[in-house]
Amino acid sequence: MLNRMIGSMRRNHALEHATVSVLLSRLGPNIRLVGRAVSSGFYIYGNVPAQELEAAAAEALVRMQRGEKQLAVSPLCGTNLAVAGTLAGVAALLTVGSGNRWERMPNVLMSAMLAVLAGQPLGRLAQKHLTTDADLADTRIVGFRHGGRGGRRYTKVETARS
């Protein structure tokens, strides 16, 4: 049961990324939106026209099913931030040691910055192997629920497996 739920979330996370990618290509990079995957689909928060979002989700699903697996990994994903933050924290802890910590501060900052730089490619690897699953062969979109008002609009894209 838990494995099935996690698998659904990973697939929906991949479709969420692909949908955001399609939306950004259609509406431009200045649109402000946030996505969040759940086991029954995913949410897009932002002032996006309903028809545009529905068309983008449908296109994203078809493109992924036709082999565009790279759409599952996004440079904008929070996984990148989580990996970079974790690496920076560990690097800082390992570098600071004991004794006069102020003397070590330049080394701590340098190690944390290098860890953040390493976080981008490692974050993408984490997405590819842990937080998304690009195999959407048996995934379908079964509905859209729109809600919210003004700048607090959202759409839930509901998915199911065939």
Image (cartoon, rainbow, N blue to C red):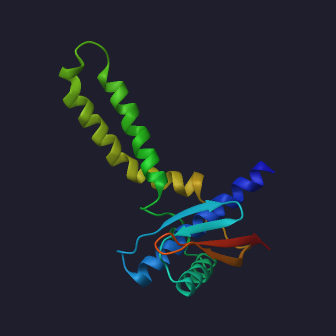
Expressed as whole percent of the image width and height from the top left, the position of residue 153 reads 53, 72
Which residue corresponds to the image point at 41% horizontal and 53% vertical from the top-left?
Answer: 121
Q: Quadrant of the C terminus?
A: bottom right
- The residue closer to the viewer here, 48 or 60, is 48
Q: In this view, does 56 lie to the left or right of 2?
A: left
| Residue at horizontal 40 percent and vertical 32 percent from the top | 90
Q: Where is residue 144 in the image (x, y as percent from the top left)?
A: 67, 78
Asked if one can make out residue 159 in the rendered structure from this viewpoint, the answer is: yes
Looking at the picture, tell me which residue is in the foreground, 60 or 153.
153
Q: Where is residue 30 in the image (x, y as percent from the top left)?
A: 35, 74
Q: In which quarter of the image is residue 26?
A: bottom left
Exactly how many numbered labels are in the figure? Answer: 0
Q: Is residue 133 visible in this depiction of the protein?
A: no
User: Does residue 148 lie above or below 66 as drawn?
Assistant: above
- Between residue 129 and residue 147, name the one nearer to us: 147
Residue at position x 59%, y 79% from top?
A: 57
Vertical position of residue 53 compared to residue 98: above or below: below
Residue depicted at 81% across the width and 51% down the height? 1
| Corner quadrant of residue 56 | bottom right
Q: Looking at this rendering, what residue extends furthest in the top direction?
A: 99
Q: Could you say where residue 78 lies in the image, as x and y percent from the top left?
A: 47, 54
**Residue nearest the viewer, comparing 30 with 119:** 30
Q: In this view, does 13 lie above or below 80?
A: below
